[in-house]
Every structure is written in C-alpha cells, then in structure tokens.
Image (spheres, rainbow, N blue to C red):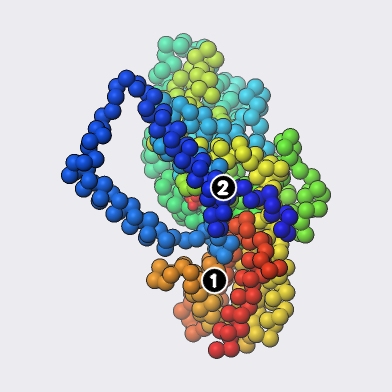
C-alpha cells in the first residue's frame, strides 16, 4: 500500500500541511508576480496611495478594524470541517489538489469575469477548453468539421448545470411547434422539409415534439432557406420575429399551452434516487414537480429499466411529451450508477415508435470516474485491463454505463466534488453544441438567415458565454483552477484516473473489512451494506441484534452517529472520525426493495411504512451511515494500520459499547 501511494505525495497540501513550504513559496511568488504586474501597468503614473498614509489616524484605525476581523475570522474558521483529513469520510469532499488551489487563489487577484471574453481575455478561453477536456473524457466528439461537436462550460455547481440541461431540452423540444405556428401566421408553408420530407403544415404536433436535436436543427435551416427563397431576404426579419413570438420562451409555459390546447404538459423522468435539484429545476422552469416522474430503482439502487420502459409506454399512450430522461452516474446518497446504456436502448425503441426524448446524465458526483476509463489516446480502456487493478471494479454494469456516456445529449459534472478543486465549480457539457442556437434570441436571428457567410462561427459566438448559459457574471478564477488541474493531471487513466483508482481501492478495502467486521459482530448487531458499492461510496445499515422495530434501529443509528458528526458546540478534536448519514425513504423504494433492505437487518417490514404514524416502532425511513472514500490518504498506514482499519475498529467498539450499555 505504501508504495502505491507515493505518487500522490506532491498532489495536496496534505493532512498535516506537509507540503506547506512549497505551497507558501509558490503562493508568495505568484502574489508578488501580481503586484509587479500592477506596478508595470503605466509605471509613469506613480502611486495613488501615499507612503505617509500609514501614519494617519484613519488608516491606522481601518487597519486595526480589518485585522481584528480577519484574525477573528481565521480563528472562527478553526471550527470548519476538516475535509482534508483521512479521518473525514463523510460528504463528497476532501483535500484540494495543489495546482487548482494555487491557480484559483492566484487568478482571484486578477478577478476576471467569465461572462464574456471582454471581461476575461485569458480565463474565458480556459473555461471553454475545460469544456473540451471534460467532453473528451466522456468520449464526445470535438471534430468541428463533421458530426456533432461538443461544448461545455462551468457553472456554480451541479444544481445549476442540471437546470441548464432542462432549459436546453425545453428550447429544442418546443421549437418545431413554434416554427409551424409562426409559418401559419405568415401564410407560409414550405413543402418537402424535415425528416419526413413533407409540408411543414403536414407535421402533427406530436411529430414536431419528437424530433431529435439534429432534425430540429435541419428543419429550422430548411424552413429559413425556403422562406428566403420564396419571399426574399428582406422579408425574413418578419418571419424570424414571428418564430420568436411563438416560442415557449416568449409566451411562457402557461401562454404556450393555452395557445396549443392539444398539447399536454411535458414530463421529465428521473430515478427515485435522483438529487433534489431536479425538483427545483421543474419548479424554476415552471413545468411543476407534478410532472417529474420518479422511476423505481432496482435492488442495486440503480434506475430500474423495466420501470422506465413502463413509464415511457404510459407517456406515449397518453401523448405526454417526454422532455428528457435523466440517468444518475453516482447517486449523491449511495454512489450508485444508473444503466446509461440501457436508457439509450430505451430511446431507440421509443424512437422506433415515433417518440423522442433527450438524455441527460447527472454525473455531478461520479463524472470524474470516467477518467479511469479513458486511455491517453482517447479510446476506452478495455474492461479486462481495468479488472486487473481491482477486486470487483468495474462491474459490467458500471463499465456499460461509462462506455455509453459518449452517446447521451448532455452531462453534469462537478469539479468541486471528485475533481478536488475549490468551490464553486460545476460543469455542463453537451454533445452537440448547435443546441446553443436555440438559446438566445439575438444570436438565433443571425443564424436564422441561414446564410453561411453571415453566420457567426460557433467558436466566436461562445465567447459571449453569458448569452448561452443561465448565469451571468461568473468566476474566472474557478475556470483557471479547473483548467490548471486538468493540465497537470489530464483526464485519462494515467493522469486523474490514477488518483481516482486509489479511491476505488479504498472502497474495495473498506467493503471487504466491513464484511469481516459484520461477521465478528454477528452476536451483537446486524451490519449490512444495503447496496454493493459501484465505485467509492459505502453505506452501512446497523441494527442491534434482537430488535425488530425500525424506529429503534434508527434511534440506535443516530446515537452511533452522534459521535461522528460535526457539532459546532464541541471542539473538533474530540471527534475521532467524521462520517455522514442518509435516510433511505420508504417513499422512494418499491415494495420489494423496501422489504429486502429492512429484512437484511432483521427488521419487521411492517414497521417500514410511508406513513410512520400508525403504530409505535414504525418509521418512514431507514437511517444509514454513509462513507465517501475520496480522501487520498485513507489507506496511508501507521504502525501497520491504515485509517480504514482504525475507523472500523472504532466503529466496532462503539457498536459493542452502545449495544451493551
Ligand atoms: C451534488 C449533486 C448535485 C448538486 O450539485 P451542487 O454542486 O451541490 O449544486 C446534483 N446531482 C448529483 C447527483 C449530485 O451528487
């Protein structure tokens, strides 16, 4: 183990700030470089702050107040969560990679705003390059000359990236309907357009709602070309304005559906294990959470494909448009990975039946795992080659999901989670960058001219980033942080993937040792891993032997956890380990799964109920301990014991004490 960890030593500041000297030296050097830069911008101007200022009363007083506050803050921050330490195995957080930390701190001094190139001549390019780096990791094509070309950018986090996915899907989904309505207002009906080469008016609403992105792009161009051919370039502005005014973005959701009475409100399908940001997204875009369909999960806490098929068939039968299906690559609570490959097959079948929907992968947590699967030359690493490095990983399901990423429409990934860079850095990556033409009205107009001479090249358009994304002003420092990290540790198996391999090793080690611990505790408590880990997150359900009530099991779990949670009323140092917990909600589990999960810890399934009211001992959730094994040092040893051994010894001891007493 020790040897395997050696390569990691320069990566982080370290649990004991072992790399403090190099960190500080670099930081000082980079800060000085910044001050020289200031001085060399018109040095002839001379200073505005006088040397003697520091002797004035107001200067001294200000400095006094500032220092008091800063020292106070620094002191208070000692109550922050020690994410950097291998005794912390709670949330999706660990030490920060030095390159990203230093790049972010340095760039902050220059304060670039990545809303547009004008405010960020250096870092906006880096942000778009980060988009390409991530796209490459997922297997998207970056070829600008043929086929879909990917693009991506940073967001404040996974939440906003998820909003953006839905925003993108909406802009494409309803465009065809707006196009047809606008043409009707102009008494214009181009013949032989679109995938079925027929008159625009001959397309049914359902057909227009179920065109894939590439067909919508083509249809839009064909209609624009036909309009200009028939009515001349000069009249085209009126048509473009008519299309604009018919769009859902102009009319609003309510207005659009009032206009099209035959249309049913669209739905979005997510697994029951999806992050709560999807509910917020449905609220924000005005589609409503009632139209968020939660698809059942299977015994591995992965989206159940049979249930997805059933939900799609139901939507099809009721002519409810499906905005999209979301697969989660690394669920927040359990780290499990949905069968992305099978979601794609479902779409094939749905398309054969005249339907269509976008596929988004919420890989906020697990996206960076893709770096392990990508070889330096860009190809997928064969599963056999990967299997040699691990005991269980990657399962055929996980490998299948990873290999399928290249075909989905868009992906959310959080550099500030498994990318080990500071907040705020999420990312949205889309497989076909032409989607941006549906996002701004202004640029769309230019594009609508359909004249290649007048078309603004995509690369140039994206430099006005703020026009195509949800956010406005945004941190150039975050972009620099992610960019430099990816340059130092490229997103393939020999770079970033090598680091993440350690997290999977840690998880496999943890899993094996937990099974051994469960055996030792067999007379004391039931200790169960409710879902086998798909990568690097392990949950534990623990029930004292003899207890059959869920409420009592949850009480026991909370008592156990009380010693392992951050508690602002106590000094941090009294905590020997810090973990996290999650509640497995009855509401989110199909009956069979609910029964299995509690059955494994000998709980009476009747006490696991949606409504916890009916009898004492019932609960609507199962309390489980959650361990994120992303800290790079959990396998580092002292006296022959690594942090996982030490944690599990501690946990075993706590369980015995609590059950005994
Ligand atoms: C963390 C997470 C999110 C939200 O990301 P933020 O960066 O916290 O906004 C969304 N989806 C999944 C699966 C996540 O793990």
Q: Can residue 477 be seen in the rendering of this structure?
A: no
> Can you see residue 225?
yes
Callout 2: few (<14), some (14-19), or many (20+) C-alpha neighbours within 10 Å?
Answer: many
Residue at the image point whose x is 68% and y is 86% from the top: 523
Q: Is mark 1 within 8 Å of ligand 1?
A: no
Q: Residue at x 37, y 59 (%)?
A: 75
Judging depth in this view, the residue of 272 and 288 nearest the camera is 272
Task: Check the image and report above or below for 480 versus 612.
Answer: above
Q: Classify mark 1: helix, strand or loop.
A: loop
N-terminal of the two: label 2 or label 1?
2
Residue topped by disc 1? 576
Marks 2 and 1, how far apart at CA: 24 Å
Going by the image, does 155 lie left or right of 295? left
Residue at image x 51%, y 41%?
26
Q: Secondary structure at mark 2?
A: loop
- Residue 19, image x, y percentages: 56, 50
Which sits in the foreground, 611 or 546?
546
80 vs 349, left or right, is left
The N terminus: image quadrant: bottom right
Q: Which residue corresponds to mark 2?
A: 97
Q: Nearer the viewer, residue 324 or 435?
A: 435
Discs 2, 1 touching: Cβ within 8 Å: no
Residue 158: x percent and y percent? Answer: 51, 48
Quadrant housing residue 513: bottom right
The residue located at (71%, 43%) in the rendering is 494
Q: Quadrant of the C terminus?
A: bottom right
């Amino acid at each position: 183990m020790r040897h395997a960890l050696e390569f990691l030593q320069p990566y982080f500041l370290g649990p004991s700030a072992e790399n403090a000297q190099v960190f500080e030296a670099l930081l000082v050097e980079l800060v000085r470089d910044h001050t020289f830069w200031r001085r060399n911008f018109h040095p002839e101007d001379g200073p505005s702050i006088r040397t003697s200022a520091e002797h004035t009363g107001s200067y001294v007083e200000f400095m006094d107040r500032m220092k008091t506050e800063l020292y106070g803050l620094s002191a208070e921050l000692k109550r922050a969560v020690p994410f950097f330490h291998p005794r912390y195995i709670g949330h999706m957080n660990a030490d920060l990679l030095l390159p990203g930390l230093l790049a972010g701190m340095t760039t902050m001094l220059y304060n670039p705003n990545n809303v547009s190139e004008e405010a960020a001549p250096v870092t906006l390019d880096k942000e778009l390059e980060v988009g390409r780096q991530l796209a490459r990791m997922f297997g998207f094509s970056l070829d600008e000359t043929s086929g879909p070309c990917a693009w991506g950018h940073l967001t404040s986090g996974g939440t906003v990236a998820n909003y953006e996915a839905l925003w993108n899907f909406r802009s494409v989904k309803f465009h065809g309907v707006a196009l047809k309505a606008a043409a009707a207002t102009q008494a214009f009906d181009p013949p032989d357009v679109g995938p079925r080469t027929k008159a625009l008016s001959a397309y049914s609403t359902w057909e227009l709602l179920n065109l894939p992105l590439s067909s919508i792009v083509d249809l839009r161009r064909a209609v624009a070309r036909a309009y200009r051919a028939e009515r001349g370039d000069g009249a085209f502005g009126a048509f473009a304005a008519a299309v604009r005014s018919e769009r859902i973005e102009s009319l609003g959701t309510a207005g659009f559906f009032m206009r099209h009475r035959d249309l049913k409100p669209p739905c979005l399908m997510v697994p029951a294990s999806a992050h709560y940001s999807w509910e917020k997204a449905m609220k924000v875009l005005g589609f409503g959470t009632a139209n968020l369909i939660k698809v059942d999960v299977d015994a591995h806490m992965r989206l159940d494909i049979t249930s997805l098929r059933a939900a799609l068939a139901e939507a099809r039968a009721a002519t409810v448009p499906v905005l999209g299906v979301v697969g989660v690559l690394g669920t927040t609570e359990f780290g499990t990975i949905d069968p992305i490959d099978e979601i794609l097959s479902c779409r094939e079948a749905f398309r054969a039946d005249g339907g269509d929907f976008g596929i988004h992968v919420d890989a906020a947590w697990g996206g960076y795992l893709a770096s392990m699967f990508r070889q330096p030359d860009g190809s997928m690493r064969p599963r056999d080659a990967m299997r040699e490095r691990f005991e269980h990983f990657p399962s055929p399901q996980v490998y299948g999901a990873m290999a399928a990423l290249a075909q989905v429409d868009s992906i959310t990934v959080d550099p500030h989670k498994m990318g080990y860079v500071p907040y705020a850095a999420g990312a949205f990556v889309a497989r076909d960058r032409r989607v941006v033409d549906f996002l701004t009205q202004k640029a769309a107009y230019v594009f609508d001219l359909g004249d290649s001479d007048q078309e603004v090249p995509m690369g140039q358009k994206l430099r006005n980033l703020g026009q195509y994304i949800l956010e406005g002003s945004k941190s150039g420092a975050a972009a620099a942080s992610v960019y430099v990290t990816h340059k130092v540790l490229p997103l393939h198996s020999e770079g970033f993937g090598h680091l993440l391999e350690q997290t999977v090793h840690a998880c496999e080690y943890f899993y094996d040792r937990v099974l051994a611990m469960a055996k030792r505790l067999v007379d004391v408590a039931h200790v169960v891993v409710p879902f086998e880990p798909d990568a690097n997150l392990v949950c534990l359900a623990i029930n004292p032997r003899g207890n059959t009530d869920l409420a009592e099991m949850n009480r026991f779990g909370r008592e156990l956890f009380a010693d392992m949670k951050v508690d602002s009323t106590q000094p941090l140092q009294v905590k020997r380990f810090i973990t996290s917990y999650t509640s497995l909600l009855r509401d989110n589990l199909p009956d069979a799964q609910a029964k299995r999960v509690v059955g494994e810890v000998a709980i009476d399934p009747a006490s696991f109920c949606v409504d916890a009211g009916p009898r004492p001992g019932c609960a609507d959730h199962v309390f489980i301990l959650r361990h994120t094994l992303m800290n790079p040092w959990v396998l580092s040893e002292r006296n022959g014991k690594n942090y996982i051994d030490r944690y599990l010894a501690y946990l075993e001891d706590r369980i015995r004490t609590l059950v005994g007493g």
